[in-house]
Image: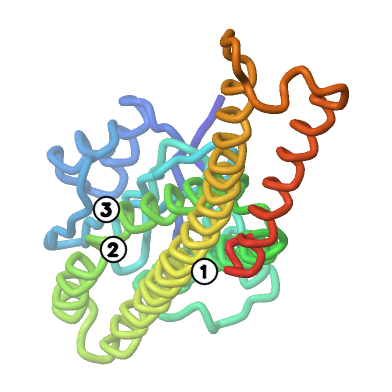
Amino acid sequence: MLMITRYKHKNLHWIDIDSPSADEIRKISDEFGIHPVVSNELLSPTLKPRVDLYENYIYLILHFPSFHGALGERKINEVDFIIGRDFILTTHYEEIDALHKFSKIFEVNSILDKSDIGKHAGFVFFYMVREAYQSLLNELEAVKDSLERIQERVFRGKEKEMVRELSYASRNLLDFTRATKLHKEVLHSFQVAGEKFFGADFTYHLRSILGEYYKVDDAISGNRAFLEELRQTNNSLLSTKQNEIMKVLTIMAFITFPLSLIAGIFGMNTDNLPIVGHPQDFWIVVGLMAILTAIFFWFFKHKKWL
């Protein structure tokens, strides 16, 4: 199955490669003059993002988190970009929703012969990465909605059930942070490389790419702050509920102790026990215990311990 998709708009070419084979990479490298070191990098995922400036292109690696629901599959997907003057190559090892959406935009612009994509491939990359960051913002908005639903359930008395839900949300935000924490440094380096490669006229778009990243970073920080406040609130309510339960159990134990003591005393096998032997001795003892119970309950209510 062919995993290379080609798009063209005027003199700009975009080649998207999904899970590339060695033979596919060799052919593409020969066609666009890709350095063998870069070609080898394209064959397998890389742990860290980075940017390298070559004579005829810029090589950039970025990682993007992907989620399918709170309990769904979680992945961190790598995308390798090779950005020339009139071409851009993208390689990845999983399907990337943002690239799929951008391909529709690119095709529409090509069909309608619009010229707003730009004069060189740097503009294609700008719109492409902007779509990727918008996709992350949509994911983070879904996380925020999930936190708001958790907040509603917390105040409906579902504190215990929400402990796990909060853990899932924390895990997702941790993956967002882990995947994007190095973007800032790499995009700053890309800005320097982009100005050298494409010229000063492209500086505005390079700074705009950083602006898109900062939107994602602010959304992550906002969600994390919301999560921490919600976790503390949930823990406080849960602790309060547990303390109330322990207080009731302690009071019940305090009440039953003297009653057990009375029952134990009148159950002693001795010759001279008061009341024992009286025709109504059972009801007298039971009545005494009931009176003591009522006194204890009144006392605890008076002290507002119940």
State the SS at label 1. helix
Query: Which residue carries the number 3 mark?
Result: 61
Q: Residues within 10 Å of mark 3 (few under 14, many from 20)?
A: many
x, y percent for residue 54: 12, 59
What type is the residue that disc 2 sits on?
Gly
Q: Residues within 10 Å of mark 1 (few under 14, many from 20)?
A: many
Does 52 sit above or below residue 271?
Answer: below
Note whether 286 is above or below 230 in the view shown: above
Front tag of 1 and 3? 1
Judge left or right: residue 215 versus residue 10. left
Q: Secondary structure at mark 3?
A: strand
Closer to the camera in the image, 247 or 187: 247
Residue ID at (29%, 36%): 45
Question: Closer to us: mark 3 or mark 2?
Answer: 3
User: Where is residue 186 shown, x and y percent of the image?
Assistant: 20, 65
Left-right relation of 100 to 198: right
Expressed as whole percent of the image width and height from the top left, the position of residue 98 reads: 54, 57
Label 2 SS: loop
Is label 1 in contact with label 2 (beta carbons under 8 Å)? no
Q: Give the camera-side residue of 39 and 262.
A: 262
Q: Is residue 11 visible?
A: no
Q: Which mark is residue 2?
A: none
Q: Residue at x 57, y 54 (%)?
A: 244
Q: Tell me the distance, in whole angstroms, between the alpha carbons under discs 1 and 2.
A: 28 Å
Mark 1 or 2: the one toward you: 1
Residue 137: mark? 1
How far, Cα to Cα, is label 3 from label 2? Answer: 15 Å
Distance between mark 1 and mark 3 Cα atoms? 20 Å
